Image (cartoon, rainbow, N blue to C red):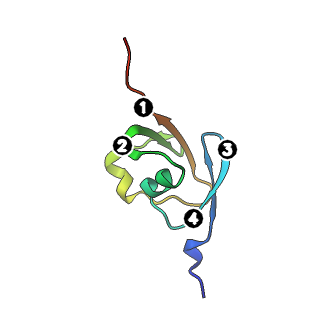
């Protein structure tokens, strides 16, 4: 019998409905979608989430993530 916590979940990522495996933490979800966690800022369900909270932050069905990539450079 499969663990229901591992069933795929739907979440909203940067305004789009997306699917990912259930049971993942925030950093794993970011990596699943191709982000490098050290190069992004995350708004989680409407609040900027401090990086120190990421390791313990579970991502669940219908959560809303806005991910902003940090871009270096300039002139």
Q: Is residue 72 above or below residue 7?
A: above
Where is residue 46? Give x, y as percent: 53, 41
Q: Nearer the viewer, mark 3 or mark 2?
A: 2
Disc 3 element: strand
Report the residue that reaches farthest toward the bottom: 1
Q: Residue at x 47, y 52 (%)?
A: 31
- List the residue tagged with mark 3: 16
The mark total stands at: 4
**Residue 38, picture quadrant:** top left
Q: Earlier in the sequence, mark 3 or mark 1?
A: 3
Q: CA distance from mark 4 to mark 3?
A: 16 Å
Q: Earlier in the sequence, mark 4 or mark 3?
A: 3
Would residue 33 be found to the left or right of residue 53 on screen?
Answer: right
Report the residue that reaches farthest toward the top: 75
- List the residue tagged with mark 1: 70
Q: CA distance from mark 3 to mark 1?
A: 20 Å
- List the residue tagged with mark 2: 38
Q: Residue at x 45, y 57 (%)?
A: 28
């Amino acid at each position: 019998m499969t663990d229901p916590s591992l069933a795929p979940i739907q979440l909203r990522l940067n305004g789009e409905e997306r699917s990912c495996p259930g049971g993942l933490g925030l950093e794993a979800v970011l990596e699943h979608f191709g982000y490098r966690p050290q190069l992004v800022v995350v708004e989680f369900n409407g609040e900027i989430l401090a990086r120190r909270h990421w390791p313990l932050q579970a991502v669940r069905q219908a959560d809303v993530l806005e991910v902003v990539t940090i871009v270096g450079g300039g002139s």
